[in-house]
Amino acid sequence: MTIQPVILCGGKGSRLWPSSRKSFPKQFAPIFGELTPYQELLQRLSGEGFAAPIVATHDDFRFMATDQAQEVGIWDANVLVEPEGRDTAASVLAALMKSGAGAETLFLVTPVTHFEGSDEAFRQVILSAVDRVRRGEIALFSDAAADAAAPRARVAGGRAQNFAVVQGGASDACAAGMALARGGDLMRAYERLAPDLVEPCRRAVEDGAPDLGFFRFEPEAFAGARKLSFAHDIVGRAERTVPLPLGGACTDIASWNAVWTLSDRDADGVATQGDVMAVNCSDSLLRSDEDTIQVLGVGLKNVVAVAMRDAVLIADRSQLDAIPGALAKLEARGRKQAAEYPRYHRPWGWYESLVTGARFQVKRIMVKPGGVLSLQSHVHRSEHWIVVSGTAEVTINEEVKLVPENGSVYIPVGAVHRMANPGKVPMFLIEVQTGSYFGEDDIRRYEDIYHRC
Amino acid sequence: MTIQPVILCGGKGSRLWPSSRKSFPKQFAPIFGELTPYQELLQRLSGEGFAAPIVATHDDFRFMATDQAQEVGIWDANVLVEPEGRDTAASVLAALMKSGAGAETLFLVTPVTHFEGSDEAFRQVILSAVDRVRRGEIALFSDAAADAAAPRARVAGGRAQNFAVVQGGASDACAAGMALARGGDLMRAYERLAPDLVEPCRRAVEDGAPDLGFFRFEPEAFAGARKLSFAHDIVGRAERTVPLPLGGACTDIASWNAVWTLSDRDADGVATQGDVMAVNCSDSLLRSDEDTIQVLGVGLKNVVAVAMRDAVLIADRSQLDAIPGALAKLEARGRKQAAEYPRYHRPWGWYESLVTGARFQVKRIMVKPGGVLSLQSHVHRSEHWIVVSGTAEVTINEEVKLVPENGSVYIPVGAVHRMANPGKVPMFLIEVQTGSYFGEDDIRRYEDIYHRC
């Protein structure tokens, strides 16, 4: 018996700002330790008994979904790209159809949540439901432990129709429960409860197309699917749904209060991460998300403070709901920190701006092994590249050459150039741009292996 | 008639951390707007009626004292360098002796304080005291406005001996009042009240030496001077001292509460500086000290938050006294942010570290017109220099060449090299260091125009 995981991770939350942003949502952000919640979930759902995961995510996060899976050794994830967010019911239905699996296939549909307990305990809970699911029931797993701070699916027991699936606002796609069901039973539930979704999703799959290892739903058809919640509107209202306890605390990390709840705290209720000193503080969460920033908190009560290189949040823990509205205002004022993460993920790797001044900008760039930037030129800037780790293959006009560690190269204004990493280890490079304008739109692209021309 | 200003600015406070540090004290930090408190004071004491200022400061700040004076157009400041802090009474006595002025000369001795009022109003207050000072009185100016948050010299009226000069702890040298007196009257006060200071200060001056435009007191002699406060132990106890009101609020910016008090605040008592959004906050001070950092405060009451690139303070306004102790602990743990400012001032300009990673470091460097770095070499690193503004004169081994804006140059490990700015405008340069060790002690110096070899 094999279970087919379907991971829903298209959410765009802003409740864990600044550690997550609209461009870098919480499921992909390392809020606790090294691994991201998405990576923890992937590991939990890998190995014996589980098929290669289906991952449904937004267009913006497709490379992140693949990269982070590969970082934990999962190379066979099937990433389905949603051209726009249509809530979870449409995501799941299109994923079921795309899987091509039969009516008897067992699907485990889950948002990205944090599970406190061993992977083995998790697996046992899932397996214990298999028999009843094979008899036609739909299992909706949830954790009944009360936690006012972290919205989650709550199960009162009794009739499934009465489930109050509390949704996490902006992070809706990741806030609901986890379901185990046969493909056929789920299809019947859709046909009864949301028959209007069937045709748009069928066309989105039939007219969709593979794209660099992803599968992209056809945008126009997918846009026609009504926005409904899988947990609330489909599973929560299906005839044979049974609520089951997860047996371990399962928390949607929906706010900084949830992070505080899940963190180790001292006797005064203070949780810290990174270079933080707390003096006379209580019931607070203090984080430095960069190893170059020292945070000092003095006399704070019930406060969340999170320091990053480009943004700092300081909030009373009773007023965290005001964060998304404030960020919307900041975004409207053109403050890029409101929505953009300071490290920009690209198919070839990532870059970050270290400093911008009059007539110059300094960036740090990482190119993955095999990564190739587009062949491009700039009208307004010249560039100096210094390889600090790994080896770069650099194209400048007609010339192609290898630049080793500690080597440098100069790209004049207007030169057609390209950077690639032909090696086996990540290549790190410092780029110093000089000129009058440094916008990302001063790029004329001639060729791009990731089809971005 | 000419008044001789003596500015006391050797203080090393940590109460405005992180905007000021032990290595960059508040008198030199731009807490309000563009000018520093030291620069505001210099401007106030320049022009008709005032002689070129005498500035008494600590060895560590001598270049800052000169540079900041020149930035506001004052090129003739006489900077006296104290090899170690011996409190203000010794500073003033040695300054009086060094000035060589006669007994009739009028001295205006002042710490660096913030004066709310026009420069003209300030000048009038000083001038109005001249007649009585010429008759032998010592005027001690102060502001009687109550401000529990900001320690300052308080004048109850009546006998000068009863002055309660409240001192600002670590920032002692800048916390007391301002005095106008004849040199001879001050000398007599010293001879009566602190006769043991006379000999050490006399020797510190006689055996002291000019050094690159500064005058450095002889260290051993100066170290023998007892630590006494000029305002409290000399002027406050002198026989003919008269307290006079300043006629404008004069505040020692001794803590973040003083900054909050002096700042523009909204109806809820919230003062902000830089890119800050405050939502539902009250009676708080929220600052972003870098134009690349967005601060968001939500639901804060009575909080001070200050964000810099390398350090963030969040403190309840009633517990600011805990800051110096916390910083001492951080310093003991080797956290350089506790005492060092992220921009390092040097005689030739300044540098700051932008990012440090495995095997590389990126610095931004500014060299003043005419500035010349030492002729040096490194054992552990090579360097790439990219000129982003101005022109550099670069020496590498036997070769000397000019590197214009947008030019770059490579300094191999072991090469004897030097950077200078032969131009008329500041030169800005990005330095990328690659290697295994980046400590400032990996510098072998061969020549240094600032005598640092």
Image: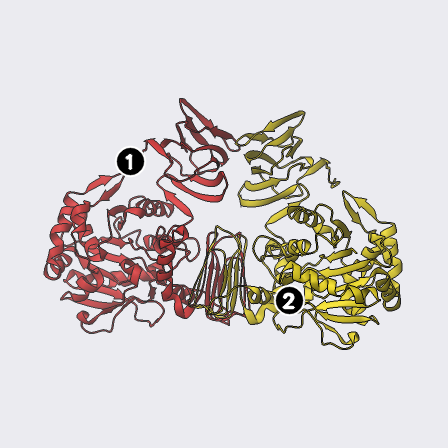
Chain colours: A yellow, B red
Q: Nearer the viewer, mark 2 or mark 1?
A: 2
- B424 and B297: which is toward the camera: B297
Relative side of A199 to A173, left or right:
right
Disc sitting over residue B451 in the figure: 1
Q: Quadrant of the N terminus of chain B?
A: bottom left
Q: Amino acid at mark 2?
A: Gly
- Residue at coordinates 53% horizontally, 33% vertically from top-left? B406
Q: Are marks 2 and 1 on the same chain?
A: no
Q: Residue A291: give x, y in percent of width and height.
A: 49, 51
The 10 Å Cα crowd at callout 2, few under 14, some 14 to 19, many 20 or more, is some
- Residue at coordinates 49% horizontally, 33% vertically from top-left? B384
The 10 Å Cα crowd at callout 1, few under 14, some 14 to 19, many 20 or more, is few
- Residue at coordinates 71% horizontally, 73% vertically from top-left? A155
**Parent chain of label 2:** A
Q: In what element is the residue under mark 2? A: loop
Q: Quadrant of the C terminus of chain B?
A: top left
Q: Residue B372: give x, y in percent of width and height.
A: 37, 34
**Parent chain of label 1:** B
- B338 and A423: which is toward the camera: A423
Q: Residue B100: give x, y in percent of width and height.
A: 16, 47
Q: In what element is the residue under mark 1? A: loop
The answer to whether one can see residue B101 in this image is no
Looking at the picture, does residue A17 appear above or below residue B363?
Answer: below
Q: Residue A290: give x, y in percent of width and height.
A: 51, 52
Disc sitting over residue B17 in the figure: none
Q: Quadrant of residue B123?
A: bottom left
The answer to whether one can see residue B226 in this image is yes
Relative side of A355 to B188, left or right:
right
Q: Tell me the residue that label 2 is attached to.
A: A248
Q: Amino acid at mark 1?
A: His
Looking at the picture, does residue B282 appear above or below residue A289?
Answer: below
